Each structure stands twice: as structure tokens, then as C-alpha cells.
Image (spheres, grey):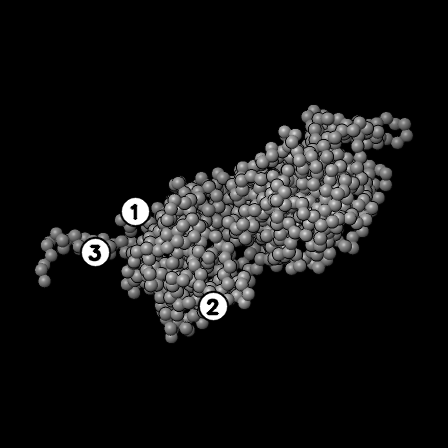
């Protein structure tokens, strides 16, 4: 054989030496979740802690049948991977939202790309035993149709499969991850061989397949990952990197192609950086995947392009690109005052959780306590408690649903605080987490994942359970999402809460001024959340539009852009002040907001309030004004979605109001197409006061009565109907009787404007056996009629009467025979003909029967309670309190400052 020239031999030797040095300089593996240096500690923990032992046993049990089969039939599990087994496409193409075709031939089978961006599908996710081996057929995939009678198996195109393709691969690669872990723990190569046989073909297939391309220009081109239509759905990155991490030494001694594997990780990380969305929750999910990929890689010096672990971590933490924003700058998106992220509830919670996971992952390897550098993240995670109704589920507005908090964020805070000696913070968050443990909704007996086992503390410190009231205020307002929360009490059964939102931030809906109401342990007026998917017809036409919400529609036209909407309301006044830690026990709450409906330029104003009549009873006030600014009003329709039984309409004497079947509320009549989703429509021409009544079960098996008392007005038509099910409801937040069921709905149509004839409601929720109920709702007017004024009297069975005052212009003074009012909102309560309390909200003066409050200077809010010879006051501004004395003694002027 001809001898190589000396310079070639030298260069070759130099390259071999360089490769040897680079391999020698490689960091130890594993390091993402566990490390060689703490292996003994981990094994001791498994031996000593029943929870850790139980988790490892569950991993072994889950894996056992697959290992047994693999010993006799090593192709079985591998053949279930979703690959281009026969076609070996080196290129894949998509058209719009769906897979189109493949081209080119790679030297090995390549990884199959996702079927569709839309996850909605008529086909069931198959068990691995039912997956066709080496499934690469021109007919598509063989799956079971879940909507056809008998649920037949059939061949279908990938575009009809939703996300089934990547879910099958994720399940198989998760088994490989489990086997890799058990190999690292036991050194038994049967686990390593099983994991390798899955991992290597997949990685080779991804190495030889290019990133997806679009057939024609489409915005999806900027969003796609290597395996899925969206970089945020590349969850397979986690089991891939962990499998590699645990098997690194096995791969090295088996002479597997480590360079190829690392090249795939780098290609994946580059794809995550290059594509996606930089300014919402996508960015943080991308950052999480990049972090896993970065931690699997070696130091920068090991790569010719200098792009290794430090490079990609720096990309996550400090570098901005067109599609990936650094976490350093991402932190500026949280509202510095409230800690709220500019997206709807579920997505906001997800963001803070994802960031903390990234910090915890990096800290595991680098010990750099990033959490300590960004206190806004701690504030954001605690701010998430403001989303909770008293029953522990979040509010639902926009695409968000009723959901639990992400307890992982609380667990990771606890772990970080313990590691770095933040004892007081650990005690606070542990106390908050213990509430959910006591309620049985968060269990720590057996970790549910390897992440939990490796990143949560083993045992919590012993400390008292903390209430949500310790970290939230009665009133919460976050302007960056145009959302107000009003609380009156925090207990599960007796707490009352209003969540009120407009449409600002990502994943928002076209809903005007929308509300959800909570009382007696249930959300009695729920939002509808998103449709089957963001691209489904029901979402586009109904769930993301006005008819699905508790709002007012103008002329059957109210609508505007959804998802990343910019339509906020203005908060004109609110009590208690959001910065106030509490209100007086039994005191009212209220907020008044203004909104311009874009489609008709109608000015809308909604005042909502709570009034507690006792510790166990209370009611809501809802005053909704709406009028086009050009005066061309045709109609305004107040929509109210309940739960449970159909809504019964009763007159003021509780007698049924006659109704007939209706063909109104339809797109054929010029209304929104969302009205076509209404069913069983009944209508009544009715201008007098009325009561809408529906019953629903609560989670304890009791029955709740909800009554909506509404002031009458000329030109009214009342509709009762069934609306589509709320997709906001969580299976655990409602009894089975309500989950997935249509919503009883009330629509009140006002011909012409609804500004001087507003929708005025009092809503009461009671248990069926309760005796503390409203006996009568009536209405009063000033001595000189004023169409901008609303007066309500609410009499209860406790010999109590509340006088409620509201004026559209708080600077206008109106007079009555027994007093005056100048303000936005006021409540005077009388018990046994004696005044018990006076509240003035954003006003100048209120008085009755010689009792009165007069604000000194600018307007403000004051609450005064007369209780057993004591005077309790909560005041935002200086004021004069007038109290009549007995006999002929003059009225005493008492000035009290805040």
C-alpha cells in the first residue's frame, strides 16, 4: 500500500490528537437531573425514602413488559416508532396547517413529521400494541375512528391525525428514558440495550432529515420544529436528552456516534432559536427545550463552531434574536406592580412556571441561583394566587380554563429557597402549598415524574397551613390584561368573587366587558373558554366571540379581533383600593369600568359589586349601560350564562312568565353567527321587573338556587335558551351532572339604547335550605327624575334593607326627601329601621335620615359601620361624618382622616 505523504500523516495525527483531547475534555454525564458525584446519595435516598423507592419501583413495573418482549423480539418496540421506514424521506413539506408530502431518499429511515398543526382529530390515540409495525404506507396511518358507529379502524391521511404521530414517538422515547435511568442505577445492560435500540434509530433518522419546509409561503414556516408544526410542541426533547445523558458512558464504550447525536441536539436547539414567537408564552417553552439541549452538550471548546453548552445557555439567558427573546429581557414583560404576565390566566401561570424550571435546570448544573437575580419571578408566582376562586380553581377568560395552579412552581420555589437558606420564604410558600395538600389536590406520597424526584425537596418543613388571603387583596386589578377581581370573603362556601375582564393581551377573546361570578363553592355564571381547538369552527364562530360570554351585544354586531387583542376597559373607580390589604368585615365591594365596543363604537359601562347580608349570605349587583355614540342604536342584548336547570322566568310576584318558541337570535336575521349555536329558544315580550331562576348541584351534592332580579324597562324581550357547554369547566370543579352539559342562558333584548335604560340586576345564590334570602327587590328615583341614576332597594329576611345608589356622573348631585347623593356608587343599610352602615364610592356626599358622609376635597370612598356603640371606619380621603343625636341636640360634625 502506498505510504501517505508526511504532511498528510501529520495533519491526520493532529486531528486524532485534537479529537482525543476534545473527548477527554468532555464533561461528566449524567448532569441534567442527576450526576455521578451524587449517585451514592441518590441510591441512599431510594433506599431510605419510601416515596423515592415507590417511584423507582413504578418505573421498573412500567418498563417490565416491554423489556420482556424486547428480549425475544427486539424489533417490536422499534417498529412502533413513527418513521419513514420505506420512503426514507430526507425532506418533508407542509401546506398551510397540514403535512403535504416528502421528497428525497436518506440512507436510513427518517423521523416522520407531524400530521397537522391542529390537534383536533376524529381518531383515537392507539395503544402501542395496536400501532402497525413499520407503518409507512401510501394510504397514511391506520387508526381508530372515534366518531363513527362501532369506532372502526381505517387508513387515513396524516393531515387528519392531529398530533398522534408525535405522541406515539414521545411515549416510546419516554420508555427509552426510563430504561436509561435504570441502566445508570443498576449498570444492567439489558436496560441500556433497550434504550439504545430505540434512541439510535430515532436520532439517526433526525440527523438525516432536514427541517420541514412549506410548499408555498405561509406563516407556519416561522413556527415549525423538527418533528412538529410548532416549536412549542417539541416535548420529545426532554426524554431524548435525558436518555442520552444517562447512557453517555454506555454509548462511549459501545463506540456509538456521539458526534452525530450532539449534532442533532445542536440542530434542534438552532431550530428552537430560529423559529417560534418571541413575545409570549411560546418563547418560554422554547427556552425550556433549548436548556435541556444545552445541558446535554459539552463545553463550547469541544465544537469547531464554538457552539456548545455555554453558547446555548447564553442564548436563553441573555441573547435576543428575531424569534427568541432572552429571559433577562422577558422579565420586563411582567407588570412590575402586579406581577401579572400579559396573557390570560392559564398561559400566565405557565410562563412563570416555565421560567422557574429553566432556572432550576441551569442551577442544578451551574449552582448560580438565577432566581435570586430576578425577584419579579417570585412576585409573579405568588401573584398567580389572584387567579383563584375560593374553591381553588383559576378564573377563565379568553382561552384560559378553570384549572389548578401549577404546584411545580411552588415546589421549585421551596427547593431553591432551601438550597440557598431563604428560610422565611420557604416557610411562606410551604404554608401555601400545604393548603392544597390538606385538600387532597396535591399529593407528594409518590413522585409523578423523574423531574419531581430530582428537583423537589424530600420532606416539607413543619409549618401552619397558610390561606390564600395571606397573599391576595380583596380587590386586584392588573391593567396589562384589563382584568379586575373583587372578593368578599375567602372561604370555600361563603366566599364571593367577581372576575371581570375586557380583551387585552394574548389569547384574549372578543367579549366586551365580561364577568364570571362565584358563590357558595361554585362558579354560577361561567365563561366558555376556547373551542375544540383554536382552528375549529366552533371556536372561530362561537367560543371566542361575544355570544359565549356574560356581556352585552350591540345591534347583533359586536365583534373584533381575538387572540392578541388590544381592547381594554378603563377602570373609573373601585373599592377597596387594590393596594388595600382588606376591607371592613361585611363591607361592600364594587368596580366601575368603561369600554368602547369597536364594531359599533358603543360606549359601555359596567358596575359590579358585592353586598354581604351576613357571614353566610350576600348578593351581587350588576349595572350595565350601553349605547352607540352615534345614536343609531337598534338593540342591546344582555347575555347571562348559568349552569344546571333551564332558566325559569318569574314576575315580581314569583309567578311564571308566559313564553313561546322563538326563531330570533339568528344569523339569518343579521345577528352574529355565534347566535346560531343557541338551542331551545323561548321568548317573552316583557317590560316589567322579573326574576330569572335556575338550580344547580354543588360539589357536595347540595342544590343551589340562583336568582337574577332585573329591573324592567320598555321595549324588552326576554329569551331563555340552551348555549353550548362551557369548555372552561374542570372535571373536578363541578359535579358530573354539570360537566360537558349545555348552559342555561338568559338573553335580555332592549330595543334602542341601554344607557338611560340600563340592565340592572341583583344576583343571589343560596343553598336550597337557606333562610337568609332576599324577600324583595324594588327601585327608587330622586325627587327630580334623572335617567342617569339607578336606585335599588334590597330587602332581606333579616329585617334588613339595603339602599343602593348609582349615578353615571359622580359629580351630579341628586336629592331625595330623606337625603342626597353625589357619587358613583353608594350603599346605605338599615336594620330594624336603624342605619347600620353607610358606604360612599368615588363620590362627594351621601345622606339619609340625618346620617351622612361628606368628602373633604376631591371625591373618594368611605365606609362607616355603626356596630354596638362602636364606630368602624375605612376611608381613602378625609371626610365629615354627620350623625343625628337624640332629642333636640344638634347634628354632630365629626371629621375623621384616613
User: Quadrant of the image for the C terminus?
Assistant: top right
Say whether disc 1 or disc 2 marks the residue closer to the N-terminus. Answer: 2
Work out whether residue 254 or residue 704 is closer to the camera in this orientation and state it.
Answer: 704
Q: Based on the displayed image, in which of its 4 quarters is residue 585 positioned? A: top right
Say whether disc 3 or disc 1 marks the residue closer to the N-terminus. Answer: 3
Task: For marks 1 and 2, give the CA distance.
Answer: 40 Å
Q: Residue at x 68, y 52 (%)?
A: 680
Task: For marks 3 and 2, give the CA distance.
Answer: 43 Å
Question: Mark 3: few, some, or many residues within 10 Å (few <14, many ≥20)?
Answer: few
**Disc 3 secondary structure class:** helix
Q: Look at the numbered discs 3 and 1 and tell me whether their residues touch, using CB distance below 8 Å.
A: no
Q: Residue at x 38, y 73 (%)?
A: 73
Residue at image mark 3: 16
Q: Look at the numbered discs 3 and 2 and tell me whether their residues touch, using CB distance below 8 Å.
A: no
On the image, the x and y values in percent for residue 877 come to 69, 29
Question: Mark 1: few, some, or many residues within 10 Å (few <14, many ≥20)?
Answer: few
Task: For marks 3 and 1, give the CA distance.
Answer: 19 Å
Q: Which mark is residue 306?
A: 1
Q: Residue 62 carries which label?
A: 2
Amino acid at each position: 500500500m502506498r505510504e501517505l505523504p508526511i504532511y498528510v500523516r501529520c495533519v491526520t495525527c493532529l486531528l486524532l490528537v485534537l479529537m482525543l483531547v476534545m473527548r477527554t475534555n468532555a464533561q461528566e454525564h449524567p448532569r441534567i437531573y442527576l450526576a455521578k458525584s451524587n449517585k451514592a446519595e441518590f441510591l441512599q435516598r431510594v433506599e431510605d425514602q419510601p416515596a423515592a423507592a415507590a417511584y423507582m419501583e413504578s418505573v421498573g413495573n412500567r418498563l417490565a413488559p416491554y423489556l420482556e418482549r424486547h428480549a425475544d423480539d427486539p424489533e417490536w418496540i422499534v417498529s412502533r416508532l413513527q418513521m419513514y421506514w420505506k420512503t426514507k424521506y430526507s425532506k418533508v413539506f407542509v401546506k398551510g396547517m397540514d403535512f403535504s408530502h416528502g421528497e428525497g431518499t436518506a440512507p436510513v429511515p427518517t423521523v416522520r413529521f407531524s400530521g397537522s398543526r391542529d390537534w383536533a382529530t376524529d381518531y383515537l390515540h392507539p395503544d402501542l400494541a395496536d400501532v402497525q409495525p413499520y407503518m409507512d404506507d401510501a394510504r397514511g396511518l391506520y387508526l381508530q375512528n372515534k366518531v363513527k358507529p362501532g369506532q372502526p379502524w381505517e387508513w387515513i391521511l396524516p393531515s387528519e391525525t392531529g398530533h398522534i404521530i408525535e405522541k406515539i414517538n414521545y411515549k416510546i422515547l419516554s420508555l427509552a428514558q426510563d430504561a436509561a435511568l435504570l441502566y445508570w442505577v443498576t449498570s444492567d445492560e439489558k436496560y441500556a440495550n433497550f434504550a439504545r435500540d430505540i434512541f439510535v434509530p430515532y436520532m439517526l433518522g433526525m440527523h438525516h432529515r432536514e427541517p420541514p419546509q412549506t410548499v408555498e409561503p405561509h406563516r407556519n414556516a416561522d413556527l415549525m420544529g423538527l418533528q412538529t408544526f410548532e416549536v412549542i410542541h417539541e416535548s420529545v426533547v426532554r426524554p431524548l436528552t435525558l436518555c442520552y445523558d444517562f447512557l453517555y458512558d454506555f454509548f462511549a464504550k459501545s463506540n456509538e456516534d456521539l458526534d452525530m447525536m450532539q449534532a442533532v441536539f445542536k440542530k434542534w436547539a438552532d431550530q428552537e432559536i430560529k423559529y417560534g414567537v418571541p413575545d409570549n408564552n411560546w418563547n418560554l417553552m422554547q427556552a425550556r427545550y433549548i436548556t435541556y439541549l444545552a445541558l446535554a452538550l459539552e463545553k463550547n471548546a469541544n465544537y469547531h463552531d464554538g457552539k456548545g453548552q455555554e453558547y446555548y445557555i447564553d442564548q436563553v439567558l441573555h441573547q435576543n434574536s428575531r424569534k427568541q427573546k432572552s429571559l433577562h429581557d422577558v422579565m420586563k414583560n411582567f407588570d412590575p406592580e402586579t406581577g401579572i404576565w400579559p396573557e390570560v390566566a392559564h398561559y400566565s401561570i405557565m410562563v412563570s412556571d416555565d421560567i422557574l424550571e429553566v432556572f432550576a435546570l441551569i442551577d442544578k448544573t451551574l449552582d448560580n441561583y438565577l432566581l435570586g437575580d430576578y425577584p419579579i419571578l417570585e412576585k409573579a408566582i405568588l401573584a398567580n394566587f389572584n387567579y383563584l376562586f375560593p374553591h381553588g380553581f383559576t378564573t377563565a377568560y379568553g382561552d384560559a380554563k378553570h384549572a389548578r395552579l401549577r404546584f411545580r412552581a411552588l415546589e421549585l420555589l421551596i427547593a431553591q429557597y432551601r438550597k440557598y437558606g431563604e428560610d422565611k420564604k420557604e416557610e411562606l410558600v410551604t404554608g401555601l402549598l400545604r393548603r392544597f395538600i390538606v385538600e387532597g389536590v396535591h399529593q407528594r406520597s409518590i413522585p409523578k415524574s423523574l423531574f419531581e424526584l430530582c428537583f423537589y425537596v424530600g420532606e416539607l418543613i413543619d409549618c401552619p397551613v397558610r390561606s390564600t388571603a395571606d397573599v391576595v387583596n380583596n380587590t386586584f386589578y392588573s391593567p396589562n390584561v384589563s382584568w379586575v377581581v373583587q372578593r368578599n370573603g375567602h372561604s370555600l362556601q361563603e366566599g364571593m368573587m367577581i372576575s371581570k375582564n375586557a380583551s387585552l393581551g394574548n389569547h384574549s377573546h372578543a367579549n366586551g366587558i365580561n364577568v364570571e361570578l362565584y358563590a357558595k363553592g361554585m362558579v354560577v355564571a361561567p365563561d366558555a373558554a376556547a373551542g375544540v381547538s383554536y382552528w375549529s369552527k366552533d371556536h372561530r364562530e362561537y367560543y371566542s366571540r361575544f355570544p359565549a360570554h356574560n356581556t352585552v351585544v350591540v345591534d347583533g354586531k359586536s365583534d373584533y379581533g381575538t387572540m392578541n387583542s388590544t381592547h381594554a376597559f378603563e377602570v373609573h373607580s373601585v373599592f377597596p383600593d387594590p393596594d388595600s390589604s382588606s376591607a371592613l368585615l361585611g363591607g361592600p365591594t364594587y368596580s366601575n369600568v368603561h369600554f368602547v365596543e369597536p364594531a359599533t363604537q358603543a360606549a359601555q359601562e359596567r358596575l359590579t359589586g358585592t353586598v354581604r347580608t351576613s357571614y353566610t349570605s350576600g348578593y351581587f349587583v350588576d349595572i350595565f349601560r350601553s349605547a352607540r355614540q352615534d345614536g343609531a342604536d337598534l338593540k342591546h342584548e344582555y347575555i347571562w350564562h348559568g349552569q344546571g336547570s333551564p332558566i325559569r322566568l318569574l314576575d315580581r310576584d314569583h309567578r311564571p312568565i308566559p313564553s313561546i318558541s322563538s326563531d330570533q337570535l339568528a344569523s339569518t336575521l343579521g345577528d352574529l353567527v355565534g347566535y346560531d349555536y343557541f338551542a331551545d329558544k323561548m321568548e317573552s315580550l316583557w317590560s316589567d321587573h322579573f326574576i330569572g331562576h335556575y338550580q344547580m348541584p354543588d360539589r357536595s351534592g347540595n342544590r343551589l338556587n340562583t336568582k337574577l332580579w332585573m329591573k324592567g324597562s320598555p321595549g324588552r324581550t326576554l329569551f331563555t335558551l340552551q348555549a353550548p357547554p362551557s369548555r372552561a369547566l374542570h372535571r373536578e370543579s363541578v359535579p358530573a351532572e354539570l360537566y360537558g352539559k349545555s348552559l342555561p342562558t338568559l338573553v335580555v333584548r332592549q330595543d334602542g339604547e341601554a344607557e338611560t335604560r340600563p340592565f340592572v340586576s341583583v344576583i343571589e345564590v343560596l343553598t336550597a335550605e337557606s333562610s337568609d334570602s332576599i324577600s324583595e327587590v324594588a327601585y327608587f328615583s330622586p325627587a327630580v327624575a334623572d335617567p342617569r341614576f339607578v336606585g335599588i332597594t334590597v330587602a332581606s329576611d333579616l329585617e334588613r334593607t339595603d339602599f343602593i345608589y348609582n349615578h353615571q356622573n359622580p359629580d351630579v348631585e341628586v336629592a331625595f326627601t330623606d337625603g342626597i347623593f353625589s357619587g358613583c356608587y353608594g350603599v346605605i343599610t338599615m336594620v330594624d329601621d336603624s342605619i347600620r352602615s353607610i358606604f360612599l364610592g368615588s363620590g362627594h356626599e351621601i345622606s339619609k335620615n340625618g346620617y351622612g358622609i361628606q368628602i373633604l376635597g376631591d371625591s373618594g370612598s368611605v365606609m362607616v359601620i355603626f356596630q354596638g356603640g362602636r364606630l368602624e371606619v375605612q376611608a381613602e380621603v378625609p371626610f365629615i361624618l354627620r350623625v343625628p343625636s337624640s332629642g333636640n341636640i344638634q347634628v354632630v360634625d365629626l371629621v375623621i382622616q384616613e
